[in-house]
Image (tube, helix red, strand yellow):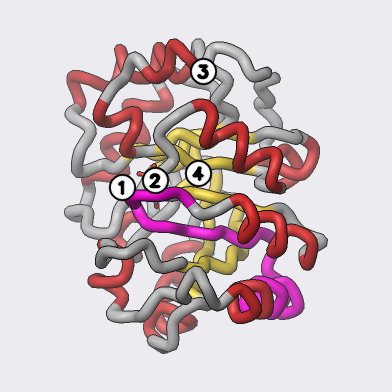
Amino acid sequence: MKHTTSNILDTIIANEKNLAVLIDPDKMKPNKVSSFINKVNQSVATHIFVGGSEVDKGVTETLVIELKKHTILPIVLFPGDIIQITDKADGILFLSLISGRNPDYLIGKQVEAVSKLTKTNLEIIPTGYILIENGKETAVQRVSETKPIKRSNIQSIKDTAKAGELLGMKLIYLEAGSGATHPIESYIITEVKQQLNIPLIVGGGIKTKAEMESAYTAGADLVVIGTAFEKDESFFNELKNLT
Ligand code: 1GP
């Protein structure tokens, strides 16, 4: 079921299976927006996330304005940098890269963003962002100059997620990285979810409906898919309903 409430976080909490379609402003051509969004609208998607690791100034706002013409789904910024902040969206994942130890991505950029954010009406959702290793270097890793947590280090993944919750974050995002070869394994999702009293987002490398369903079954409250739609829009046909 689609929700149009202004409270994005409440919607995520209320829905059992949220699906965010991630659109990278650098990869979405303006003339493709309309046909792409029509497919999103006909799918089970509940949210649109907009963002990327490296996006030029102004591109995000132009894209969000165009998206708004074609959908009533909430548009949530998932920014790699401050220049991606625009008040034309509905909300923003206010990310802290808690798997890393780079102060710029833990708190520095967030401080820099405040003067811009306070001039917007965006719903600001504090989100603990946890990068899990995927066998190859991801864009987040390269740009943030941080190391992901090893998949085998389940205790560290769980403790990092719980620390985020105890610090007051409202969402935890387990990230394998855009275009990851393998999505985050179900047992990791389940073990992390068992620790948490806040919703869990899972993304990176999810390419099939079965992988998406298995993330939900393992405990994901919201699944993010980007690359699979960029590569093959017919994937939306499989997502007209959930089992
Ligand atoms: C990336 O988690 C998101 O930040 C989505 O990843 O592009 O691999 O679907 P994909």
Residue 164, quarter of picture: bottom right
**In this rendering, would 111 be left or right of 51?**
right
Mark 3 C-beta closer than 8 Å to ligand 1? no
User: On the image, numbered disc 4 is attached to which residue?
Assistant: 76
Where in the figure is residue 111, as x and y percent of width and height? 46, 80
Frontmost residue, 31 versus 237: 237
Distance from disc 2 to disc 4, alpha carbons, whole Å, reads 20 Å
Instruction: Please report contact status of discs 1 and 2: CB closer than 8 Å, yes or no.
Output: yes
Depth check, mark 3 against mark 4: the one in front is 3
Bin the neighbour count of mark 4 within 10 Å (Cα to Cα): few under 14, some 14-19, many 20 and up. Answer: many
User: The residue under label 2 is which amino acid type?
Assistant: Gly
Residue at image coords 49%, 69%: 151
Where in the figure is residue 139, as x and y percent of width and height? 26, 62
N-terminal label among 1 and 3 = 1
N-terminal label among 3 and 4 = 4
Residue 206, quarter of picture: top left
Distance from disc 3 to disc 4, alpha carbons, whole Å, reads 20 Å
Bin the neighbour count of mark 3 within 10 Å (Cα to Cα): few under 14, some 14-19, many 20 and up. Answer: some
User: On the image, numbered disc 1 is attached to which residue?
Assistant: 179
Disc 1 secondary structure class: loop
Disc 4 secondary structure class: strand
**In this rendering, would 57 be left or right of 196?**
left
Mark 2 C-beta closer than 8 Å to ligand 1? yes
User: On the image, numbered disc 3 is attached to which residue?
Assistant: 239
User: On the image, numbered disc 2 is attached to which residue?
Assistant: 205
Where in the figure is residue 115, as x and y percent of width and height? 45, 71
N-terminal label among 4 and 1 = 4
